[in-house]
Image: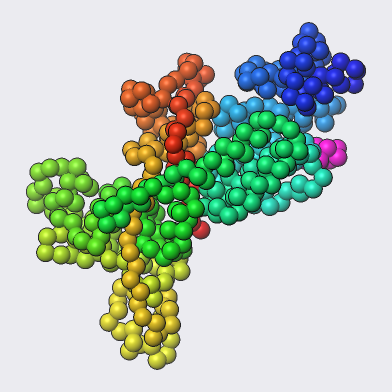
């Protein structure tokens, strides 16, 4: 390594991108191309950075495995910043293996952290947590330690484990201070601020109250029956009933939960679920069918009963505890048949000890900080990065055409804007100030 290359590398480590470019901007040898690519990435010129890194990887050739692997890792980080998530993770995994084989542990760990951050963007929290648990961060540079702790904090935040998130953020702040990198300190401060911002709204008995993440965690652990409009499902304790792909049943469940402890008129349910103001007998027949489906699905968590004017939802008492989100036949033990007779709604559940008085369980509606069918889409765009429609579709689990239609509607409303054309088109949205969108992100609340 010549003196100019070494000086440029030291400048990049110190965050002096312009100083690095002054030393290698007129050179076209592979090491100089790689350093120019990294410098351009630090300056935000991501397409140019990717082009330079690809040229460097090609020019290094097959005999320079270590240098090529480093270029692959740098290009993967640029792709992550550009929100291009469709590439195969095998290339990055192969580069990490090559770096480990050449005893470059720091860059190997950096590659694995990039893979973890990609999993987080795609909402694969279980995979991200498993990968983080397998990383050995001992003896690493403070900057890499800060990145690893930030990833751990994000996993904890999106899993609603606020105590673990606060501990990880404290470690990340300490590492970022030792590294002396302002960007890392700013990222830690931004994630800490998310803990103090409203994350959702609680709708209960006609009243609405903003909740922070810690308060949402406490609500979900309280044993109440929660209609979660952020993740679109019903939750009571550890039991979870997803309704995201059943929009009619979700609207019916939400209407019943909002009216608790009262009931909802049949015509009001028809108007809300079927979007018609002139119900007829066909709508009433369909309502009976959909209520029957909802009653069967929600049986482990709640009763849905007919009233004189409509329907009402009643949470199961706390002495009937569902162990899973699916119905599980658990026959009572000897001597309990008589005591359990006449309690058919609990026949599919495990029971708490006999003699415990049935507790009253309230029904609460958890509403996202912003309403609308495109709330999760806006939450992804609110990070300030430019997203492609393919990356948004991967993160949301929807088809690319569905995402394109939603973006067109949001653009017409002035809430997002497009830059570029055709395959180079990217989408941006202004930051959503005043609250955090963690509960709207993909798999923000894994319930396994």
Q: Is the magenta stretch mostly helix, strand or loop?
A: helix
For residue 298, side relative to residue 137 (left or right):
left
For residue 72, side relative to residue 377 (left or right):
right
- Above or below 417: residue 135: below
Residue 29 or residue 253, whichever sits in front: 253
- Per the rendered image, the range of residues in magenta is 96-105
Quadrant of the image for the N terminus?
Answer: top right
Q: Where is residue 156 in the image (x, y as percent from the top left)?
A: 58, 50
Residue 87 or residue 168, whichever sits in front: 168
- Above or below 1: residue 27: above
What residue is at 73 percent from the left and 19 percent from the top? 17
Residue 5 or residue 364, whichever sits in front: 364
- Residue 89 among those drawn in magenta: no
Q: Where is residue 244 in the image (x, y as percent from the top left)?
A: 37, 48
What residue is at 19 percent from the left and 42 percent from the top? 275
User: What residue occupies the far top of the structure in this picture?
Assistant: 26
Name the image colouring.
rainbow
Q: Where is residue 63 in the image (x, y as percent from the top left)?
A: 85, 26
For residue 148, side relative to residue 60 (left or right):
left
Residue 98 can be seen, yes or no: no
User: What residue occupies the far right of the structure in this picture?
Assistant: 2
Residue 139 or residue 84, whichever sits in front: 139
What residue is at 52 percent from the left and 28 percent from the top? 384
Q: Where is residue 10 in the image (x, y as percent from the top left)?
A: 82, 24
- Choose top left, top right, bottom left or bottom right for residue 32: top right
Residue 308 can be seen, yes or no: yes
What residue is at 42 percent from the left and 90 percent from the top? 334
């Amino acid at each position: 390594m010549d003196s100019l290359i070494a000086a440029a590398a030291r400048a990049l480590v110190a965050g002096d991108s312009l100083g690095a470019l002054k030393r290698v901007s007129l050179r076209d040898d592979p090491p100089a191309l790689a350093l120019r690519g990294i410098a351009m990435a630090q300056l935000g010129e991501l397409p140019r950075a990717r082009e330079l890194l690809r040229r460097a990887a090609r020019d290094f050739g097959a005999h320079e495995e270590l240098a090529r692997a480093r270029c692959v890792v740098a290009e993967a980080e640029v792709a992550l910043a550009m929100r291009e998530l469709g590439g195969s993770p095998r290339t990055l995994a192969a580069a990490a293996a090559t770096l480990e084989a050449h005893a470059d542990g720091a860059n190997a760990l950096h590659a694995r952290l990039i893979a973890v951050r990609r999993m987080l963007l795609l909402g694969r929290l279980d995979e991200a947590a498993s990968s983080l648990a397998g990383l050995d961060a001992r003896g690493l540079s403070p900057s890499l330690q800060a990145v690893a702790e930030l990833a751990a904090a994000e996993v904890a935040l999106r899993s609603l484990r606020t105590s673990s998130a606060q501990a990880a953020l404290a470690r990340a702040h300490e590492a970022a201070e030792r590294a002396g990198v302002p960007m890392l300190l700013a990222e830690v401060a931004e994630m800490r601020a998310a803990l103090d911002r409203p994350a959702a709204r609680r709708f209960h008995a006609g009243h609405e109250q903003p909740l922070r993440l810690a308060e949402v965690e406490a609500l979900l652990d309280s044993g109440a029956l929660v209609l979660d409009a952020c993740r679109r499902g019903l939750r009571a304790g550890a039991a979870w009933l997803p309704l995201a792909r059943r929009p009619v049943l979700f609207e019916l469940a939400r209407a019943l939960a909002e009216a608790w402890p009262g009931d909802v008129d049949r015509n009001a349910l028809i108007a809300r679920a079927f979007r018609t103001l002139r119900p007829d007998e066909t709508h009433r027949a369909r309502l009976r069918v959909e209520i029957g489906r909802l009653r069967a699905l929600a049986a482990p968590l709640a009763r849905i009963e007919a009233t004189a004017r409509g329907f009402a939802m009643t949470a199961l008492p706390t002495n009937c505890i569902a162990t899973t989100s699916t119905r599980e036949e658990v026959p009572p033990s000897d001597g309990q048949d008589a005591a359990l007779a006449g309690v058919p709604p609990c026949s599919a559940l495990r029971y708490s000890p006999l003699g415990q008085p049935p507790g009253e369980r309230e029904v609460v509606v958890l509403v996202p900080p912003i309403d609308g069918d495109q709330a999760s889409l806006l939450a992804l765009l609110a990070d300030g990065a430019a997203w492609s429609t393919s990356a948004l579709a991967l993160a949301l689990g929807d088809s690319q055409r569905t995402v394109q239609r939603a973006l067109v509607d949001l653009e017409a409303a002035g809430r997002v804007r497009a830059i570029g054309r055709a395959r180079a088109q990217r989408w941006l949205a202004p930051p959503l100030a005043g609250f955090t969108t963690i509960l709207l992100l993909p798999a923000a609340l894994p319930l396994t």
